[in-house]
Image (spheres, coloured by chain):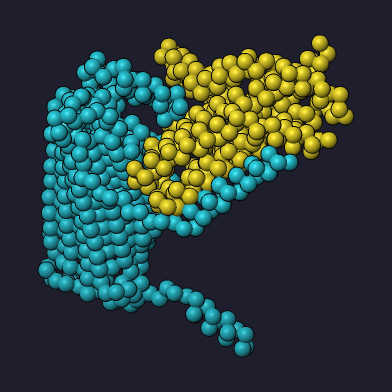
Chain colours: A cyan, B yellow
């Protein structure tokens, strides 16, 4: 009897799920339009439906778990709905359609297939949302925040990881995506058929591609940090069939290709920092209005590559520029030639990528730069900058490493001498 | 007798002015490039221009020095009659070859130890310079494979001058010509054929084999592009590691076996 009691006590202790008794759906049904429903802390299971103007506000520890395929909260045909301060779990988090004035704030959505899905929304404001998807292949996951056929959308200050696309935007007119972080997903933010979009101050790290922009016109991508996109087909930002795009003041670091432009027009790439990418900018079928100006290129294996059309390079800083500035005006006296035979081959035949930065290609590129300086018409910067914002690298002395080095030198010299004596 | 031979060979190797100059040159070039690159560029994980430089310095210089010195050493023995004299001692051909191999490997290990020591010491003083473990491993593999190849060249050449020229030809063939030939072929054949040819060349060119190993063991095979997904996925698996080890062993064993065969043939003549 004592043993059974102990077992029961143990089971009671390890059981963390205690279902709350508050009936949220009943409260929603009863609420007058404009009402605020405060949901007490607790674990709730169910699929809520909201069809009127209300605020659902949780307390610390409020969690709603969706049952089955339906979302935890469905919002339909309602104006001015706010969901605030709660945790959602289950297969789907929030699905909203035909809504105007929707606000989603302070939400944690864990282990979901798709977290937020909005269709035909207007004036939607999503902020401080933490989304963690599941550990599965991208094809088996849903999106973090997906917005379809909507207008006037703001998504800000959210952290998203392990989903298919962090923020998926399709057929939206007027969207601002700012101060978000998307990691370990397929695409950080994916714009499709969208107009008047802005991606500002976001951090995209270790996704397949940070920013995927397709069939979109009028987009501003500014002040973002795009790092560690090194997968087979990965890029920091990929623009396909895009018109009128401004990419400015972004830091693109350690990506396979920092910016890939395909079939795009009127793209302005200005004041960005390209550091340590395998290829900084790649362009195919890009129009002659596309300009790459006043950027800094440091430590990239290939600065630029393109098809025959190329794109315009102007007044950029290149760390591998070897020209002089006899006029002392901060601009190099001879043009910088970014084009390399190998880079162009790689665009035409992807198999050539195997040779990237191999000894043979390094030699070929050096010869290219010596031979083809005047002959090229594409990917030539006539006014390369020689100065950049100099930042002094912090020097940290490592005594242990120094001593180890000294040990290696002395012991090898000693061994050498010993070898000579014997 | 066997250990005496190794000591003697090592002594000769270390005494050689050429070897000493090579040691100085390698240390100077290796250190300058690595320190300048690492000091000038931000510290970033992954395959960057600085890691590419690191890899290329290693692949350019070390095979060149090993092939020339190693091949001339054995060819010199044959040319001067030292090898014939050694045969009068109670020592087998295999012992001679292994002695030569070990002596050359040890001599080059000392050279890279000095170079790595200087890089580490300078890195410690200046900060921001590291010596990744994979580069150390790759250097050891490089010495093991190219010393073996050098002996094979020396056995074929028989005179020091011929050994030197043959080494240079083979070095440029592995480093540059084979890649350029493939790139040229790529302009006239379909992508999938070029991909298959590249995979073959990867296995029959020790420089490419070491470079490929770098990408596999640093888990950066994506650098090689999606066309090589299957082959990189295989070599990144446990079985792939075993196969990589076996192929590397073959690259050491086959040239040594070939050397033994050549010397035996020479003796018969």
Pinpoint residue B267: horizontal percent, then vertical percent: 81, 16
Query: Is residue A115 shown left or right of residue B244?
Result: left
Query: Which residue is nearer to you in this view: B264 or A63?
Result: B264
Pinpoint residue A240: horizontal percent, then vertical percent: 25, 32
| The C terminus of chain A - image quarter | top right
Mark yes or no: residue B198 visible: no
Residue occupying image coordinates x 24% and y 61% = A128
Query: Which residue is nearer to you in this view: B54 or B67?
Result: B67
Q: Is residue A105 above or below residue B63?
A: below
Residue occupying image coordinates x 34% and y 43% = B41
Pinpoint residue A73: horizontal percent, then vertical percent: 27, 61
Pinpoint residue A103: horizontal percent, then vertical percent: 17, 60
- For the image, the number of numbered tags is 0
Residue B73: name its quadrant. Answer: top right
Residue occupying image coordinates x 46% and y 14% = B185
Query: Is residue A350 shown left or right of residue A40?
Result: right
Mark yes or no: residue B265 visible: yes
Residue at the limit of the structure toward the bottom, as seen here = A2
Residue occupying image coordinates x 17% and y 29% = A326
Residue A93: name its quadrant. Answer: bottom left
| The N terminus of chain A - image quarter | bottom right
Query: Is residue A26 shown left or right of residue B101?
Result: left
Residue at the limit of the structure toward the front, as seen here = A421
């Amino acid at each position: 009897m004592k043993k059974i009691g102990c077992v029961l006590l143990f089971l009671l202790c390890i059981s963390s799920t205690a279902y709350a008794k508050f009936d949220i759906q009943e409260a929603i049904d009863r609420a007058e339009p404009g009402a605020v429903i405060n949901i007490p802390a607790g674990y709730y299971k169910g699929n809520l439906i909201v069809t009127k103007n209300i605020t659902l506000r949780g307390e610390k520890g409020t969690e709603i778990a969706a049952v089955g395929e339906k979302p935890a909260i469905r919002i339909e045909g309602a104006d001015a709905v706010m969901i605030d301060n709660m945790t959602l779990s289950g297969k789907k988090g929030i699905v909203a359609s035909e809504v105007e004035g929707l606000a989603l704030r302070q939400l944690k959505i864990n282990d979901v297939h798709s977290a937020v899905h909005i269709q035909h929304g207007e004036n939607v404001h999503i902020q401080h949302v933490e989304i963690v998807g599941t550990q599965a292949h991208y094809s088996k996951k849903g999106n973090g925040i997906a917005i379809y056929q909507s207008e006037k959308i703001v998504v800000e200050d959210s952290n998203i990881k392990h989903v298919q696309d962090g923020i998926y935007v399709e057929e939206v007119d007027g969207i601002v995506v700012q101060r978000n972080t998307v990691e370990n997903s397929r695409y950080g933010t994916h714009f499709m058929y969208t107009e008047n979009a802005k991606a500002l101050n976001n951090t995209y790290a270790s996704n397949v591609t940070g920013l995927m922009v397709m069939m979109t016109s009028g987009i501003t991508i500014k002040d973002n940090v795009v790092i560690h996109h090194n997968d087979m087909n990965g890029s920091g930002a990929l623009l396909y069939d895009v018109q009128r795009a401004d990419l400015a003041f972004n830091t693109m670091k350690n990506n396979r290709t920092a910016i890939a432009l395909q079939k795009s027009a009127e793209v302005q790439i200005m004041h960005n920092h390209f550091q340590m990418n395998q290829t900084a900018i790649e362009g195919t079928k890009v129009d002659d209005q596309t300009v790459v100006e006043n950027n800094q290129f440091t430590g990239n294996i290939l600065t630029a590559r393109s098809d025959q059309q190329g794109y315009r390079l102007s007044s950029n800083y290149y760390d591998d520029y070897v020209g002089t500035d006899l006029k002392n005006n901060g601009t190099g006296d001879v043009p910088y030639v970014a084009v390399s035979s190998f880079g162009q081959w790689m665009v035409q035949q992807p198999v050539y990528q195997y040779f990237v930065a191999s000894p043979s290609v390094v030699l070929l590129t050096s010869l290219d730069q010596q031979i083809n300086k005047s002959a090229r018409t594409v990917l030539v910067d006539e006014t390369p900058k020689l100065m950049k914002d100099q930042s002094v690298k912090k020097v940290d002395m490592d005594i242990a490493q120094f001593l180890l080095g000294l040990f290696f030198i002395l012991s090898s010299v000693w061994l050498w001498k010993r070898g000579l004596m014997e | 007798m066997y250990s005496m031979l190794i000591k003697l060979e090592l002594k000769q190797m270390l005494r050689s002015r050429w070897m000493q100059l090579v040691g100085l040159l390698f240390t100077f070039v290796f250190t300058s490039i690595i320190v300048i690159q690492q000091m000038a560029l931000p510290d970033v994980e992954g395959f960057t221009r600085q890691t590419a430089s690191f890899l290329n310095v290693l692949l350019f210089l070390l095979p060149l020095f090993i092939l020339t010195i190693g091949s001339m050493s054995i060819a010199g023995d044959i040319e001067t009659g030292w090898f014939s004299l050694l045969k009068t001692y109670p020592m087998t051909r295999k012992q001679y070859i292994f002695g030569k191999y070990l002596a050359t490997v040890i001599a080059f290990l000392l050279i890279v130890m000095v170079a790595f020591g200087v890089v580490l010491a300078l890195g410690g003083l200046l900060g921001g310079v590291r010596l990744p473990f994979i580069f150390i491993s790759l250097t050891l593999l490089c010495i093991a494979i190219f010393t073996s190849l050098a002996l094979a060249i020396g056995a074929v050449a028989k005179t020091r001058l011929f050994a030197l020229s043959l080494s240079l030809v083979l070095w440029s063939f592995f480093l540059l010509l084979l890649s350029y030939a493939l790139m040229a072929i790529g302009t006239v054949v379909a992508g999938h054929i070029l991909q298959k040819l590249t995979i073959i060349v990867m296995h029959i060119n020790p420089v490419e084999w070491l470079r490929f190993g770098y990408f596999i063991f640093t888990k950066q095979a994506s650098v090689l592009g999606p066309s090589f997904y299957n082959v990189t996925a295989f070599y990144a698996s446990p079985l792939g590691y075993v196969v990589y080890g076996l192929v590397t062993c073959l690259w050491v064993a086959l040239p040594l076996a070939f050397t033994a065969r050549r010397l035996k043939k020479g003796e018969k003549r």
